[in-house]
Image (tube, helix red, strand yellow):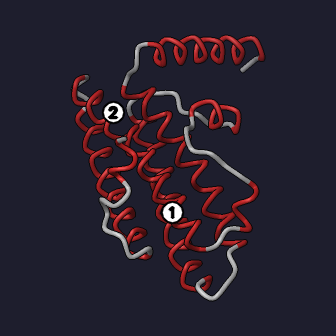
Amino acid sequence: MDKTTIETQYQAEIKQADVDHHTPTAGAMIGHIMANLAIEQRKLQQMKWCVTGPASLAFKNVVADLLVENGVLLERTAQRLLDEGEVIPTTTAEYQEYGMLTEDARIKYWTPTMMTTELVADYRTANLFVTRAIKLAQKEERLTLANELIDLLGRNQHQIRVLQSLLNLTPQDGLEEEAD
């Protein structure tokens, strides 16, 4: 394949991504989900590497499990989109453009409690995109995508419950403040 053909394909991808993001499709929304998963992967790794303090060993074990699950979910999501003929984000620049989670080098100095609170917020933010993508996939009658997303939503909700329990909170604690 020559450079001209590659460039033509890439420009077509950029044009389609622009169309999809201005008239949201399930595929475009799932691109945001993938970007969030990729950003979360880096944040989880940062937390695992850097957490210190009396609760750090237990927290590292929780984060290690989340890292594995997150990696599997990222791969499953990418494969499902490819199965559906969608183009997936693959670069750091695309993850930064489409992702809504934030990174901060200061996290490495946070306590396990602060990190846990951040993870809960990330899962809640991720769910905003997951629930929107479910509705779009159902509307587009892309049932395989919808089912995959429903599973992802359930996994995220489970992780919120687990993380909130580490903070001695219920899964719903903190939602009232977010609604205000």
- Quarter holding the C terminus? top left
**Residue 156 % position (x, y):** 37, 56
Q: What is the secondary structure assignment of the residue under circle 1? A: helix
125 with respect to 148 (left or right):
right
Locate residue 172: give its quadrant. bottom left
Q: Amino acid at mark 2?
A: Arg
Q: Looking at the image, which residue is at 65% across and 67% down?
A: 47
How many labels, in total?
Answer: 2
Above-or-below relation of 39 to 47: above
Q: Residue at x 38, y 76 (%)?
A: 168
**Labelled pair 1, 2 in contact (Cβ < 8 Å):** no
Left or right: 41 as drawn, with respect to 134? right
Which amino acid type corresponds to the residue marked 1 in the rendered image? Thr
Query: Which residue carries the number 2 mark?
Result: 132
- The label nearer to you, 1 versus 2, is 1
Give residue 57's quadrant in the image.
bottom right
Above-or-below relation of 63 to 34:
below
The quadrant holding residue 114 is bottom right
- Label disc, if present, on residue 145 of the rendered structure: none
Secondary structure of the residue carrying tag 2 is helix
Seen at 59% across and 74% down, the residue is: 112
Q: Earlier in the sequence, mark 1 or mark 2?
A: 1
Q: Give the crowd class for mark 2: few <14, some 14-19, many >=20 residues within 10 Å.
A: some
The x and y percentages for residue 95 are: 62, 37
Q: Nearer the viewer, residue 7 or 30?
A: 30
Residue 55 image point, x, y percent: 58, 85
Cα–Cα gap, marks 1 and 2:
23 Å
Q: Position of residue 175 (x, y in %)?
A: 34, 52
Give the quadrant of the N terminus. Answer: top right
What's the mark number on residue 117? 1
Q: Label 1: few (<14), some or many (≥20) within 10 Å?
A: some
Give me the residue at 33% from left, 33% from top. 132
